[in-house]
Amino acid sequence: MSMQEAGEKKLRPARTNATKQKLFEASMELIGERGAAGVTVDEIAAAAGVSKGTVYYNFGSKSDLIAQLLRHGVDILLARLLSVKDSSGDPLAAMDAMIGQAMDFMAEYPSFARLWVSENWRTPSEWQDTFAELRSRLLEVIGAAIEGVAGQYDVDESISRGSLETAIFGACFVVGLDRQTYNPERTREQSVAAIMAIMRGYVRK
Amino acid sequence: MSMQEAGEKKLRPARTNATKQKLFEASMELIGERGAAGVTVDEIAAAAGVSKGTVYYNFGSKSDLIAQLLRHGVDILLARLLSVKDSSGDPLAAMDAMIGQAMDFMAEYPSFARLWVSENWRTPSEWQDTFAELRSRLLEVIGAAIEGVAGQYDVDESISRGSLETAIFGACFVVGLDRQTYNPERTREQSVAAIMAIMRGYVRK
DNA sequence: CTAACTAAACTGACCAGTCAGTTCAAATAG
DNA sequence: CTATTTGAACTGACTGGTCAGTTTAGTTAG
């Protein structure tokens, strides 16, 4: 479950980046399992094989660690979504590929997905602004993909673009998590197909 | 935000039921906002206008309170979903009505929805079994509605029933919560339409 | 040499759960 | 009709423990 660099944080002493990486991995795992409030800084430090002081040397606070964790995860997800090139020229196929990427991400970083759905709709929350920003970055990408479909197919304009984005975005998280938690036998393709039903219902018959 | 009786718990001294009700309402609100781990029993007691001891008199533990809270909420949601009578004879219309009921529920009890998505995919969790049971009760109802559609329309059999249930179920929560948190201007109808796109993509053109 | 890290002790706030005691409405007795 | 008893419902101070964050003096690696 390695979270390779996605955000290229300026070149700082190698040790620091390695340490931050270990802390990201450890805290992602623990927080995904037991929730942000349910995990102690001592546990995170221990799981990362690092002392507590190091956590505070690298991050200002537990809250700050989690905020950076959220950005880190979204950077990775975004990179994957953007890696989808619409080579075939069919925007529906591109959409399919993107949802596939999302499913892979959920399977690889289920803890991130759990953290996201656990804290995303909390109000007020310490990470409200972080979530708002990250959410809109993600919805932008999905919105562009829908835009692509709308440009090349006859679509049901009575369906609001925003609600559609939300439904797809949300379905990716929920279907991905449900697969991991309750239905491990479900295949990636089945999951993608179910979510793609939204798009097929969006384009006119 | 009153949670009227849904489960008709045997006739017990009036005071206790009233107290439990107040505790349900108060804890639903607080836990929905700050998460199960982020709320103290003292706060819940204070918000319900009751002493801490009363919480422990009525519930065995904080954990037990939350488990009962989950059941309580699901009872209400189930009652609403089941209130949809397929009077028109069109299973797609029935589906539409059910999703509408779900949207109303999410708007009325957003805190329940937040609690659900916050804790549902935690593993291991104190409420794992509770969630598994409640989840299957809910999916059963949605599954029956899909069954109805499949019986009367030509449907894309390549889409797995289970994944479809999950996608719709999850989309209801996510779209409902997103509306409340980020897009209050979105109408109930827009939300229902977006989710119904899944169903329209499921039936053959 | 110095930034990164360690180890361990410490502070102050917070919190789940307990328990001895109080309230009061309804039942029973006189 | 009044006095007494009962017990379910409730109270809130208290206990034992936890945890975020700080500090400090020393160690390691680049």
Image: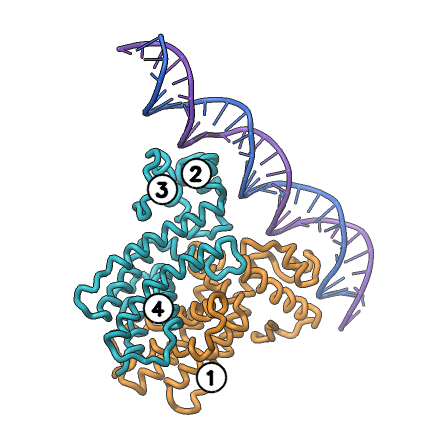
Chain colours: A orange, B cyan, C blue, D purple
Q: Quadrant of the C terminus of chain B?
A: bottom left
Q: Are marks 1 and 2 on the same chain?
A: no
CB within 8 Å, label 1 to label 4: no
**Tag nearer the camera, 3 or 2:** 2
Alpha carbons under labels 1 and 4: distance apart: 26 Å
Quickly name the residue at label 4. B168
Quickly name the residue at label 1. A84
Q: Chain of mark 3?
A: B
Q: Earlier in the sequence, mark 3 or mark 2?
A: 3
**Tag nearer the camera, 1 or 4:** 4
CB within 8 Å, label 3 to label 2: no
Amino acid type indicated by mark 2? Asn
At 44% across and 91% down in the image, what residue appears?
A: A87
Q: Is residue B72 visible?
A: yes
Q: Earlier in the sequence, mark 4 or mark 2?
A: 2
Q: Position of residue B87 (x, y in %)?
A: 17, 64
Quickly name the residue at label 2. B58
In the rendering, which numbered label is found on residue B21? 3
* SS at circle 4: helix
Amino acid type indicated by mark 3? Gln
Alpha carbons under labels 4 and 3: distance apart: 31 Å
Q: Position of residue B109 (x, y in %)?
A: 34, 53
Q: Are marks 4 and 3 on the same chain?
A: yes
Q: Position of residue B48 (x, y in %)?
A: 39, 39
Q: Position of residue B89 (x, y in %)?
A: 18, 68
Residue occupying the far left of the picture: B88
* SS at circle 1: loop
* SS at circle 2: helix
